[in-house]
Image (spheres, rainbow, N blue to C red):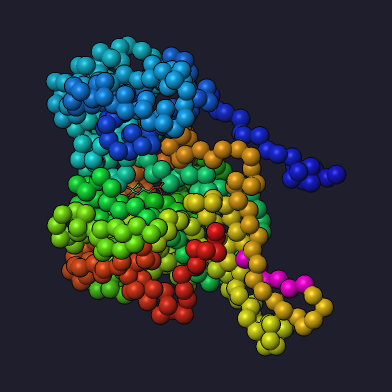
């Protein structure tokens, strides 16, 4: 048996763990939605795997006395509900310390300084707070003498609300910590399929050779959610979907899809290439927003058989904020010139699914003529599915077996993570949180990347204000406003059917 055959047959064990040094991780916003839903469970999972060194601690910053007991109780209840035994829950709980502090009041930081003591462990500060708190928190950490020479901060997205505010935050943070210790998180970069994009492209020659306008007709990036506003009205209604999802997650997917090969898998080599992609995005300016973008806001509708409220009703007042965005964009580079890239993302859509669908060009000439059974040769399509059913599918034309007339139909090669590997797919935050402690910035956004993304997004926001102030309505449980269908159909194409990746 040759080496590859042996490898193909062998069940693959989970990758070897990279050691994590002892640490103190401080989470600002410990009682917030993100911390409770994602950060603590991710840390508990890593604890279960034995990745967290014995002496490491997790400190949660809370503002109310009752949260000092209340938050650990809530975390423990969630872990127990997820099936963790009493002993294991207690073991994780022993790592938690809640610290009462008001992020904007420097005089309250003494409690944190005391809780941290003079330990030499790696100190990481996760700012899971609105971006207007980033500057005061960094300044207060510095002035309270809490930052050590290896301390690092983790900043949640969106970083600011436009280029000017992002720069202001970046400047202020840079006065306190060097770029090498600033981690701008975008959890999409921690998703397995997103990391697999680099492997798919650069560990295989098959796709890389056709990864350009020569062979690709169009690219579609869809990030569809069925959830609505949840408990985030205060933040979301001010931000809107373009800032919440496109400026970061969707553009990061586009970057990894389109980058030139970095010369090695090293943080700055990868990030240099991503910045180049962002710089090549053709600006959409002024009245062009009407032609190249679609804004939508969901009204009432039905999802999974359940009636759901419209956005304004959920919010309690009328609002001009978009909950859906579709954009037709292009990259002005040799590789991508002339390939339309369609971005589509929204809340309360028909189905939760995220994918990159790459449609190749049709064959230049059909040798099968137009005989019945062969008249339709569909272009090949590659689907990189992020969620659910993470994996890769390739649509190919095949002959239907039989000795009758030739019949050609599309079928798909289906490589799903759950069937290809017998290992658990971790949540994005599990990897990202330990990457910070290890000091690996590959999956984090560098300052220039974030600013370049805003440089592209800002004119769209300005164009909307002037030329497109009201979002179109769409029914919850649909695929967005009809204008989003028009955006692609007027160019003789259509959105990839999500059923294809099912
Ligand atoms: C967050 C956005 O960054 O990503 C949310 O703020 C969104 O609005 C979430 O719901 C989606 O993440 P995921 O991992 O569920 O696709």
**Residue 166 in view here:** no
Q: Give how far across and how far down residue 123 sits, in percent.
A: 36, 22
Q: Give how far across and how far down residue 338 sits, in percent.
A: 47, 72
On the picture, is 475 further left or further right than 20? left
Q: Which residues are magenta?
A: 395-401
**Is residue 459 part of the magenta span, yes or no?**
no
**Residue drawn at point x = 28 percent, y = 26 percent:** 71
**Residue drawn at point x = 52 percent, y = 64 percent:** 499
Work out whether 397 lies above or below 109.
below
On the picture, is 493 further left or further right than 479? right
Q: Main secondary structure of the magenta part?
A: strand
**Residue drawn at point x = 30 percent, y = 67 percent:** 474
Work out whether 310 lies above or below 371.
above
Look at the image and tell me in which quarter the N terminus lies. top right
Work out whether 126 lies above or below 6.
above
Q: Give how far across and how far down residue 142 sits, in percent.
A: 24, 24
**Residue 321 in view here:** yes
């Amino acid at each position: 048996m040759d080496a590859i055959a042996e490898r193909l047959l062998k069940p693959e064990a989970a990758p070897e763990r990279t050691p994590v040094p002892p640490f103190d991780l401080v989470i600002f916003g410990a009682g917030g939605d993100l911390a409770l839903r994602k950060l603590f469970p991710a840390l508990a999972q890593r604890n279960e795997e034995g990745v967290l060194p014995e002496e490491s601690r997790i400190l949660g910053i809370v503002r109310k006395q009752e949260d000092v007991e209340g938050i650990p109780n809530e975390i423990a209840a969630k872990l127990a509900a997820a099936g963790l035994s009493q002993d294991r829950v207690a073991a994780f709980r022993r790592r938690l310390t809640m610290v009462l502090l008001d992020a904007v009041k420097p005089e309250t930081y003494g409690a944190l300084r005391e809780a941290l003591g003079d330990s030499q462990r790696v100190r990481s500060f996760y700012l899971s707070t609105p971006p207007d708190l980033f500057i005061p928190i960094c300044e207060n950490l510095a002035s309270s003498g809490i930052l050590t020479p290896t301390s690092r901060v983790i900043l949640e997205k969106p970083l600011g609300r436009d280029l000017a505010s992002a720069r202001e935050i970046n400047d202020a943070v840079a006065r306190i910590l060097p770029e090498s210790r600033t981690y701008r998180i975008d959890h999409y970069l921690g998703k397995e399929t997103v990391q697999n994009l680099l492997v798919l492209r650069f560990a295989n020659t098959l796709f890389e050779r056709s990864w350009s306008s020569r062979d690709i007709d169009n690219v579609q990036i869809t990030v569809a959610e069925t959830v609505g506003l949840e408990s985030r009205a205060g933040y979301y209604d001010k931000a809107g979907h373009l800032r919440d999802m496109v400026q970061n997650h969707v553009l990061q997917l586009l970057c990894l899809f389109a980058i030139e090969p970095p010369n090695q898998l090293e943080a700055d080599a990868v990030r240099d290439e991503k910045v180049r992609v962002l710089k090549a995005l053709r600006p959409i300016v002024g009245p062009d927003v009407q032609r190249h973008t679609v804004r939508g806001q969901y009204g009432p509708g039905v999802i999974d058989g359940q009636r759901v409220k419209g956005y304004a009703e959920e919010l309690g007042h009328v609002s001009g904020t978009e909950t859906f965005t579709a954009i037709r964009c292009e990259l002005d580079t040799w590789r991508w010139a002339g390939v339309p890239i369609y971005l589509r993302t929204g809340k309360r859509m028909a189905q939760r699914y995220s994918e990159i669908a790459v449609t190749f060009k049709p064959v230049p000439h059909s040798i099968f003529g137009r005989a019945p059974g062969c008249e339709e040769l569909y272009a090949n399509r590659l689907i990189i599915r992020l969620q659910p059913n993470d994996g890769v599918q390739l649509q190919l034309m095949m002959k239907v077996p039989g000795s009758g007339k030739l019949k050609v139909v599309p079928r798909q090669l289906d490589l799903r993570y759950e069937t290809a590997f017998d290992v658990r797919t971790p949540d994005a935050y599990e990897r990202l949180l330990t990457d910070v402690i290890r000091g690996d910035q590959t999956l984090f956004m560098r300052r220039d990347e974030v600013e370049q993304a805003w440089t592209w997004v800002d004119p769209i926001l300005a164009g909307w204000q002037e030329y497109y102030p009201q979002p179109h309505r769409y029914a919850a449980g649909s695929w967005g406003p009809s204008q989003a269908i028009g955006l692609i159909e007027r160019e003789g194409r259509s959105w990839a059917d999500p059923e294809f990746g099912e």
